[in-house]
Amino acid sequence: MHLFCTKISCGLSQQQHTEVDPSHPRKMGSKQIAQETFDDAVQENITEFEMDPEEAVREAVQQFESQGVDLSNIVKAVRPPASENGQRQKHQILLTLDSLARAVAEPDMAELPQQLSAFAAQCKEQLAFRYLAGQKGAYPVVFSACQLAAGDRDLLLQALCTLSALLDGQPDLLDTAGQELLLQSLRQQREDAEMTLAGIRCLRHACLKHEQNRQDFVKGGILPLLTGAIIQHGDSAEVVRTAASALRIMTFDDDIRVPFGHAHDHAKMIVLENDGLRVLIEAAKAFTDNSGVLSELCATLSRLAVRNEFCQDIVDLGGLTFMDVVKQVLSAIRAMAGNDDVKDAIVEAGATELIVLAISHHLGNPQICEQGCAALCMLALRKPENCSAIMEGGGALAALQAMKAHPREVAVQNSVLACKRTLCFPTKSIDLCFPTKLPVLPYKNP
């Protein structure tokens, strides 16, 4: 294997300085390689070391990863052997892209739906497929398909769904023309729930971890379109949930390439210029039995509470009334957090802030205090990084206040003690996590 390792090292040395798009979910500081480098290594395993295809791929993955290479965007499959004239063959995702490109170029309107469907399905399989397709010119092809479908509602819906699949994890692909296409679609198709949902899904993928896209969309008027979609389609759980999520993404500060984003400004615009608090609270009243929608709405409200007066507005608008169902939501979060992989997704979605907010606002309600502390405990269990996020978000203070508020409620006391034990385990010091003197938060009895 010495020869094989040497060739891999050569491939790495030639690509260590390759610029990588920071918006892609790669590990910071890891080495990168091109798809062709991986394919060549696999082919060498087959031809020079007489490995079977599956073994050749496994060996290549093992060798690259042992040298610190991030393979998250690499298609880990055997590329078909070169043709008789020596021309390199392509991975299946690129063959499908070629078929779609031909249908767009001709254009073959009868063949286009089938090709869009096939390409979207492969993009949804894994990031590596859509990343490779994006590197090989998939975006202009899909954008052209959207333009061709402008007069055909069903075809445009399919094209937008394909665009959404391609943009997932690749927000840099979207250009100015694509932004205008999405804005125009959301304006013209605002009464069509399916079209609205497809457009908002594209928007979410384009704005996650991409500050410039967020700013461009806000300047283009996306905020009233999102709040309008929630009002227009208030009976559609998917539209309400997805639009609320998109509003929340507009308040993110998650683009490592930008030192200072406009998250705070966007939150104020949603509240002051688009009546966002009222829209979200009114929408929640239609989904009191849908924990998924309520969780998204609550998470978005927590991102909008950037001023003291906004917090008071939530109360005045009846936010605490619909928050009566928060106990059910907390119970659902607690149950889902039993899965360690799901814990990270819950914390990243902003649930920590939501739980602390719920405990603080309902400090006089022992059931909510119990469920909230239990949910924090589950999120922190076996996850030191989550412990830090909970501590920084005021979780320890909220738990202590719950304990003080309900000295005779055994369930609350047990829940808080379990939360304290779990949060303090990484530091091995309860004094660091829970100092003895803490300010008392005001609360109202229910």
Image (spheres, rainbow, N blue to C red):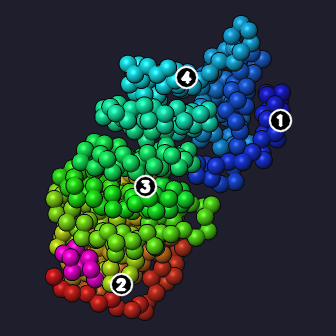
Segment colored magenta: 312-320
- Asked if residue 315 is among those painted magenta in the image, a careful observer would answer yes
- Residue at numbered disc 1: 10
Is residue 135 toward the left or the right of residue 351 in the image?
right
Q: Which is more toward the observer, 105 or 118?
A: 105
User: Residue 308 — which label?
Assistant: 2
Residue 400 seen by the camera: no
Mark 4 nearby-residue class (10 Å; few <14, some 14–19, many ≥20): many
- The percent coordinates of residue 434 (x first, y second) are 45, 82
Decide: marks 2, 3 in contact (CB < 8 A)? Answer: no
Decide: marks 1, 4 in contact (CB < 8 A)? Answer: no
Q: Residue placed at 42% from the left, 31% from the top?
A: 148
| Chain-order first, disc 3 or disc 4 | 4
Mark 1 nearby-residue class (10 Å; few <14, some 14–19, many ≥20): few
- Residue at numbered disc 4: 98
132 in relation to 318, above or below: above
